[in-house]
Every structure is written in C-alpha cells, then in structure tokens.
Amino acid sequence: MSDEAIMTGKHFMNGDEACAEGALAAGCRFFAGYPITPQSEIAERMSKRMPEVGGRFIQMEDELSSIAAVLGGSWGGSRAMTATSGPGFSLMMENIGLGMMTETPCVIANIQRGSPSTGLPTAVGQGDMMQAQWGSHGDYGVIAYAPTSPQEMFDFTVKAFNKAEQYMMPVFVMADEKIGHMRERVEIDESKVEIYPRRKPEVDPDEFKPYEPDDDLVPRMASAGEGYRVHVTGLTHNQQGYPQLDVETQQEKVGRLVDKVDKNKDDIVELDTIGIEDAEVLIVSYGMAFRTAMGAYKQAREKGIKAGIVRLVTVWPFPEDEIKEFSKQVKGIVVPEINLGQMVREVERASAGNTEVKLVPHPGGGLHEPEQILESLEALL
Amino acid sequence: MTTELKQKEEVKPELTSAEHPATKYLREERLPHIWCSGCGLGSAVTSLTNAYEKLEIPIDDIGVVSGIGCTGRAAGYFETDSYHTTHGRAIPFATGLKLSNPEMNVTVFSGDGDLFAIGGNHFIHAARRNVDMTVICVNNYNFGMTGGQFGPTTPQGATATTSPYGNYEDPFNLPDLAASAGAIYVARWTSVHARRIQQAMEEALSKRGFSFVEILSPCPTGYGRKNDLGEGIDELKSYQDRTVIKHGSDPGDAEIERDPEAEIVVGKFVEDDRPTYCDVADDYLQGQ
C-alpha cells in the first residue's frame, strides 16, 4: 500500500476498502470501530492505513464506545469516522443522537445486511433505511448517501465527510453487503478531491457562542485545546452551549437541527435520472437495488416501454419536491428495495396520490431478478 | 472590596478573597450548582480545581468529560473544554478526545452508576488499555438524579427506591475492580478527607496512564434518608469514624459493608507505571 493519504491511481478494490480510502482522502485521521460483518474490511484497512498517514485507529470494546470515541475524536480536532452494520448501527443510535444534538461532524458507514436482529450477517439487505432517519429518539435532520459501486464508496465517503463538516453533524454512508464486498475498478485522483474545511470560530473566545448559527443555520466549532473553553452537552442548550430546559430553547435548538438540513436541501439533495424525458413509468431506486433496476430499465426500453429511472444519491433528506414533480408526469412508479417496504413510503408520500406507487420487495439475502421489476412496470401500463 | 475584607486578606491572603478561589476554573454564570445541601459533589469539584491550580495545568489544556447523573452535571461547571455526554459513555468519549488530541489533560468526572452500571464495560477496557486519563468517581451508593434507586455500589441490605425490601445484590468494590482491570493509580477517600482528595487528584493527574480516584460522598437526599444516616454532616462524621487509612493494602479487602459501624478502608492502593496505550501503539507502529 501507499503512505500517501490519497492513493492517486487506478485500483482494483472492494467497496469497503474504497470507503476507507475515501475517508482518508477526505482527511479522516481518527477511526474507532468494532468488528462486524460485512464492514470488517473497512476497519482492517483503517488499521493498516491510519498509522501510515499519521492518524489514529482504535478497536473499541463495542459499537456504543466506537461512536462515543468518534464524537470525542471529532471534538479533539480530527475528522473522525466509524463503520458498522445493522446490529452495530442499532447500538450506536443513542450517541448518534448526541452527535446530532451537539452538532458534531463525523461519518458513519453502515454496510447493511439481512435483518432484523442477527439476520443474515454475510448477505445483502437494505433494512436500515428508515432507521437512518428515525433511529435515535427525537427530531433532527439527516444526510445519508447510498453508493452503488466501489467507486461511489470512495466518492460518496468523501462527500459525506464534506457535508458532515459543512452542516456540523454525523452523516451516513448507507451501503450494503454487496457494494461492500464487490470488487471493481476505483479511480482516485487527488486533484479531484475537494475538502470542506472545519468551520472554525472567527471571533475571540469571549465573544464566541458555540451554537450561534451562521446565515446557513449552521454554527462553528472550537476544538479542544483551542482556548475557547466550550461546553458541549446533550441537554437542550442555548447558543452559549449551556443547558436551558424550556420550550423556547427546545424550539430554537431542535427546530434548527431539522431546518439546517431541510432549508439547505437544494445544496444537499442529489439524484440521477435516466430516460426521464419521455418516461411513462418510473423506477425510483438506490444502492444495490439500483443496479438490478438498471437491468429492468434496459429490458423495458428494448420492449418499447417508456421507462425512466430516478436514482437517489442522497436518500436523506428525501427529495420529495423532485419526486412530486415526476409523479405528475408518469402513470406509475415502482420502488424496488431490498427490504419489505421502507423508502417506498416516502415515494408514496411525495407522490401525494398523483400516481400509483408500487413496491417491489425483497426480504434480503439476495437480489431482485430484473424481470420482477419489469413485470411491475408492465402492470402499471 | 471592603476595607474589612482587605485587612483580612492581608492577614490570611490564602484563605480570604473577594472571589471564590475556584472561580478561575468554574463558569461563574452557571452557579449556584444544582446539587443538594449536604452532597459531597461541591467539595469534590473544589478539590479538582485546587489540584489543577497546584499542578499549574494550563486551563486550555484541560478537558473535563462527564456522563449522566448528579455527578454528570459537573462538567457543566468547569470553565475548561467540557463535555457532558451520554449515560455511561464518558470514558469512550474521553478516549477519542485524548487519542485525537494527545496534548489535552483529560479528566473523567462521573458517578458510580454512570461509570460502573451502564458504563462498566468501558471502564475496564480503558483501564486495560491504559489510556492516559484520570477517572474520578464520586460514589454515593445510588442513582441520585432519578430518585434514589439502588446501583452497582449500593451495599447489600441497603434500602433504595427499587430495593424496598433491601438490596439483595452484591456491590462492586471499586478500587479492587480498578486495580484488577489495570489502573496504574488507585485511591479511595471520602468527602471528609478534602486535603487527601486533592493530593490524590494531584497524584492521579500527574501520572501518565489510567488513574482512578474514588470519593465516597454523602447523599442525604437519595441514600442517607432511606437508610437512617441523618443529614450530610452525619454521614461525614460517620466517614470520619469508620475510615481506616491503609496505604498499599490489598484493595480486595476494601469492601464496603452496610453496617454503620463497619470499617471502611481508604488510602492509596496502587501506584504503578506502565506504558500508556499511545506509547505502546507508537512503539509498535514505529518503523513499520
């Protein structure tokens, strides 16, 4: 391997390894994690590479402590991440809430597997999509990416770090076992890696309020040891960061946690469209299920069916305005996902009755056949 | 400053000043604190600020991390970088803070329930790894914040709101646990030993590695009232009568009985040196 932080060149690597390389390229210098299939290759790669680039890798005693250490690492001044799969993601939920409440930039990669519980540890699933938005208690905005290839594991992990710093919050990379273990060409080009720098205070410590937002609703962060003597708490707090347990402060604080994502959607939301211009039926998909959906799309077009695909790059915040517009132009939407119906609920909500929305479910452990998706498309015509 | 005060100051400048001597380290605007009258937390905080001052640790190098509970609120009063985290997770948060920013002098200040019930696993692993931090546990034998439920240090037989027939669990002996898990400094004192606490904190803060100080505190509201221990001052008197200083003794013999006459062993049990987590890691990684 290379002791360069950014391994410029063409590589043959799996998605987990590409995720680790994306993190290092984005400036990640602290990783805390706990072994779990199918993410272990991320931790293994980090244990090898982090010392090479002057960062710190630690294998913690569980996922509870992994995410806690990541939050501490971030306040210590490092770009920090952890990686896990479903059971570990569940264990991390409380401190993900602490990260949201304390506006702590960090990245959490979830390499999803068949679930619930221990489920299918070595096989694909997309069962944690709703958990990513609603898993910790309370209200907060969420940013989550859904890569569909090792290349995107690299690219989207870089994006995730940048959005974490830009919006001062934990950001998710919601991959799955297939993407994590798939081995493909990954091109890394240092000149194309952009870094969003940490939002540092621009005033003296006496004037600094750790939770006073800028115009974009996002505050600035003074790391440990910089002389700002910040207080950071999971209790509802005022702009100074001090606990203030009343309705007004709750509204201001928690309202802003939701608004800083919601009102910046134009900057955050990303989606790809294929064949949308003349589409009469639509596939909305993300992650591994999208690769199967592409097969269905091609077959449909070959049969003369005017199909289109909306592929979600960011699954959260959900692109409801875009889906709403699309729903007005088509006879129906199919949503293949490797769960028994999660993001389809968002598609239905955004479509608001404009068109028929049909789930193509898969319980996990394998992939759809493209024909299943094609049949659903045909049934809508 | 009044003339009278000034005169006093000239006589005993170390004892009398217009400002509370600890305010250099405390967020004055956050005071008064939330703790009950008779609680030992206030004096434990003062001991820590005194220790910081004595050691002349630059304030901007200090990070105080707490979990949840009465003791967990302590972080909010320190005018340092201070982190009030989730229940049980102060130590792993502090681990991340220290590894990410090794220049910081990291103190975890939390309670017995936070550190040894919900957070027990993190305590033993941080001690095993010898992460360079000082953990101060104010042990009041119960979950005070939530209304006085029994916890992992409640003596067997004691009454608490979730042990109305008496606690039938065996408690942890914290110095023994810390020593077994690998802590390089282990001491126990009580709230009546203000100077000893400060000295122990100075020693613990000066050690490189995982150091542990247990402070037995009165909790007249949560624990004392239900167990007929009287006011906070009565609990302090009881500590004065019951404690026996045995430096270097086997921490295995330092169990705390409910019997108000039974001896409580205090002192410095362990003072050792062992390379820290980062020292060993860097040794292994050097030249790789």
Image (cartoon, coloured by chain):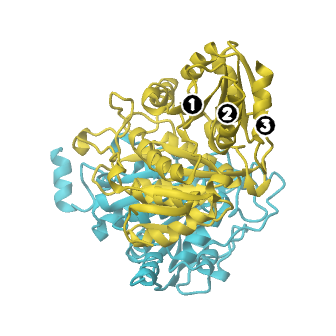
The residue where tag 3 is placed is: A371
Instruction: Specify the label residue A196 is tagged with.
Output: none
Report the Cα–Cα distance between label 1 and label 2.
9 Å
Query: Which is more N-terminal, label 3 or label 1?
Result: 1
- Disc 1 versus disc 3: distance between alpha carbons? 19 Å
Q: Which chain carries label 3?
A: A
Secondary element at image label 1: strand
**Vertical arrangement, residue A55 with respect to residue A87, above or below:** below
Residue at the spot x=40%, y=57% of the render?
Answer: A25
Relative to A43, is B195 on the left or the right? left
Mark 3 residue type: Glu
Three-letter amino acid code of the residue under disc 1: Ile
In this image, B282 relative to A184: left or right? left
Left or right of A249 on screen, residue B123: right
Placement of the N terminus of chain B among the 4 image quadrants: top left
Q: Mark 2 points at which residue?
A: A297
For disc 2, the chain is: A
> Mark 1 = which residue?
A274
Of the 4 image quadrants, the one containing the C terminus of chain B is bottom left
Q: Which amino acid does label 2 sit on?
A: Tyr
Q: In which quarter of the image is residue A289?
A: top right
**Up/down of A205 relative to A379, above or below:** below
Q: Residues within 10 Å of mark 1 (few under 14, many from 20)?
A: some
In the rendered image, what is the letter of the chain coloured yellow? Answer: A
Chain in cyan colour: B
Which is more N-terminal, label 2 or label 1? 1
Taking depth in this image into account, of A171 and A251 the one nearest to the observer is A171
